[in-house]
Image (cartoon, rainbow, N blue to C red):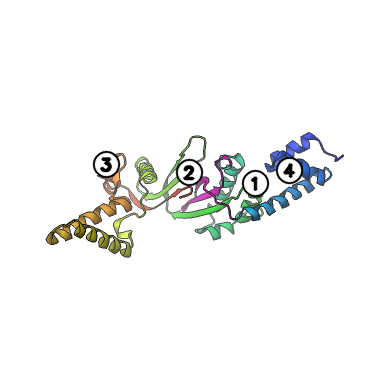
């Protein structure tokens, strides 16, 4: 009979988040040695990580941390919503994003190499994935430089952690309006700050498409330039933040709202889990 108690099983499960049967079997194999059982469970979990490598991760959460010079946002992904709301998964996300606060990491690869708790972010995620029992991955990282930030985290379901996150860097003093712009971005999902930021190749492709559509509709040749420019304007309203109708008052565009508030938006990012 192995030398361990039900309290040992309970303590080890709480420590690692492992299942009852796996925990008990590990203690049996380790003859009641807690630390040896931990090693057995971690090795078993690591093998499981390799088997899970090709699984899809469509759930997860978004987390943000601010430092004096930048805000960093991550998307930490997992397989199921059950794990997404698990305390260990949420705590993992908080630890990861905190480690990245002053790291300067701007890519996933750079973030995975950042040191944390005597290991790296990548190793920490792998270790936690082994105990959680699902594939867990750092899918996206963005670092927005600036001095002031508006952060908006949206829960698409009340029992899940935030699945949409927005960071806006800005200058000015109207924090309330800046936050409303972050909320607008979460809803409207602009790809660029202004029309000048849209790649010229994308603009020319859109111009070609709307011109062809207009011709096929039989629009007068003389009117085509004006019609095409009008339709290009509609395109910019879809993709450029400053051109968009303001979500709180569609009689105003975002550019005017920002200007009237004495703000300048210097950058933004939006993440949605799985998108």
Where residue 54 sits, quadrant-wise, is: bottom right
Element assignment for label 1: loop
Give the mark toward the camera: 1 or 3.
1
Distance in Å between CA atoms under marks 4 and 1: 11 Å
Q: Position of residue 103 (x, y in %)?
A: 54, 56
Element assignment for label 3: strand
First in sequence: mark 3 or mark 2? 2
Distance in Å between CA atoms under marks 1 and 3: 46 Å
Name the disc covering residue 22, or none: 4
Element assignment for label 4: helix
Residue found at x 35% / y 47% = 172
Judge the density around disc 2: few (<14), some (14-19), many (≥20) Cα neighbours within 10 Å. Answer: many
Relative to residue 267, is residue 137 drawn left or right? right
Decide: marks 4, 2 in contact (CB < 8 A)?
no
Q: Position of residue 113 (x, y in %)?
A: 59, 59
Q: Which residue is mark 3?
A: 250
Q: Position of residue 180 (x, y in %)?
A: 36, 41
* Whether residue 109 is situated above or below residue 241 in the rendered picture: below
Q: Quadrant of the N terminus?
A: top right
First in sequence: mark 2 or mark 1? 1
Name the disc covering residue 133, or none: 1
Give the mark toward the camera: 3 or 4.
4
Q: Which residue is mark 2?
A: 163
**Residue segment shown in magenta:** 54-82
């Amino acid at each position: 009979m192995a030398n361990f108690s039900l309290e040992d099983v309970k303590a080890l499960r709480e420590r690692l988040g492992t299942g009852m049967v796996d925990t008990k079997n590990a203690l049996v194999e380790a003859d009641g040695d807690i630390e040896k059982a931990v090693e057995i469970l971690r090795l078993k979990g690591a093998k499981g990580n390799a088997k899970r490598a090709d699984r899809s991760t469509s759930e997860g959460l978004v987390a943000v941390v601010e430092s004096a010079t930048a805000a960093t946002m991550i998307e930490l992904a997992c397989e199921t919503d059950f794990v997404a709301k698990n305390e260990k998964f949420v705590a993992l996300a908080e630890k990861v994003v905190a480690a990245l606060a002053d790291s300067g990491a701007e890519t996933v690869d750079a973030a995975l190499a950042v040191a944390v708790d005597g290991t790296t972010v990548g190793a920490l995620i792998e270790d936690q994935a082994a105990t959680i029992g699902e594939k867990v991955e750092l899918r996206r990282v963005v670092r927005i430089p600036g001095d002031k930030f508006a952060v908006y985290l949206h829960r698409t379901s009340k029992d899940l952690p935030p699945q949409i996150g927005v960071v806006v860097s800005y200058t000015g003093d109207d924090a309330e309006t800046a936050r409303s712009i972050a909320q607008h971005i979460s809803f409207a999902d602009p790809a660029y700050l202004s029309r000048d930021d849209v790649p010229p190749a994308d603009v020319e492709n859109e111009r070609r498409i709307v011109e062809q559509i207009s011709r096929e509709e039989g629009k007068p040749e003389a009117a085509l330039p004006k019609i095409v420019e009008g339709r290009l304007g509609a395109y910019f309203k879809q993709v450029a933040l400053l051109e968009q109708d303001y979500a709180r008052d569609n009689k105003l565009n975002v550019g005017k709202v920002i200007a009237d508030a004495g703000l300048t938006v210097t950058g933004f990012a939006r993440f949605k889990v799985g998108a």
